[in-house]
Image (cartoon, rainbow, N blue to C red):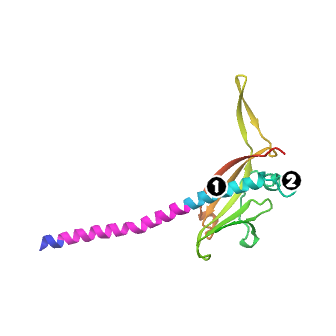
Amino acid sequence: MIEVVLGLGLLAFGLISIAALFPAGLRANQVALSETYAAQHADQFLHLLKAHMVVPASDDQDNWETYAAALPDSKPTGDEPAATAYEPWLRQDVVSYTMAGTGNQFYRVRQVGADSKDVQFSGSCRVWRSPITISHYDSGTWREIAFSKDEAVALNVEISWPTDKPYASRRKSLYQIEVYRPEL
């Protein structure tokens, strides 16, 4: 009888220990899912912004001045604009983008589920440009070539999520893509 009670006690302890792992596993799964969403949306956002920069506008001029030259040279600091200051920028299926700021350096991305009230991901992007410098090997020596902001820029984005938390307590990731101005 004592062996049965001890066996049941050990079995109960094991089952309780296993059950205690489920909340931690669910939390880890939620974190991994949100990081995946953030990476996908940052990648998609950078490529959409790049496309807007290099595709000609309706007057056969590129949008370089509107999107590349207007961005700040360093990461925007301070508070994000109020939610009411964001204007619609682009909508694709279940993902919508809004923008704000004097140089359009703040963007928000929102992904909804099948039910439009079910928000699956909400992130805020801070966008800025930085110069591009490449190394070129010519006649036995390496030379640095620096592009002006009218020729090429590195687009940087910091995506932070979820947007319902204060900026300081959000998770954040940085991404970058180089964009070269097409021939005019």
| Residue type pointed to by label 2 | Asp
Find disc 1 in the rendering and name its residue.
Answer: 43
Q: Residues within 10 Å of mark 2 (few under 14, many from 20)?
A: few
| Magenta stretch holds residue 33 | yes
x, y percent for residue 161: 60, 64
Residue 103 location, quadrant: bottom right
165 relative to 178 in the view: left or right: left
Residue 143 location, quadrant: top right
Find disc 2 in the rendering and name its residue.
Answer: 60
Q: Nearer the viewer, mark 1 or mark 2?
A: 2
Asked if marks 1 and 2 touch (Cβ < 8 Å), the reply is: no
Is the residue 7 above or below the residue 153 in the image?
Answer: below
| Residue type pointed to by label 1 | Asp
Residue under the image location 62 percent in, 75 percent down: 116
x, y percent for residue 114: 58, 73
The residue most toward the right is 59
x, y percent for residue 92: 68, 65
Find the distance from the CA under tag 1 to the CA under tag 2.
27 Å
Q: 76 or 147, which is in the foreground?
A: 147
Q: The residue tagged with tag 1: helix, strand or loop?
A: helix
Please give the range of residues in magenta. Answer: 6-34
For the N terminus, give its image quadrant: bottom left
184 relative to 98 in the view: left or right: right
137 relative to 115 in the view: left or right: right
Residue under the image location 71 percent in, 31 percent down: 136
Residue under the image location 88 percent in, 56 percent down: 59
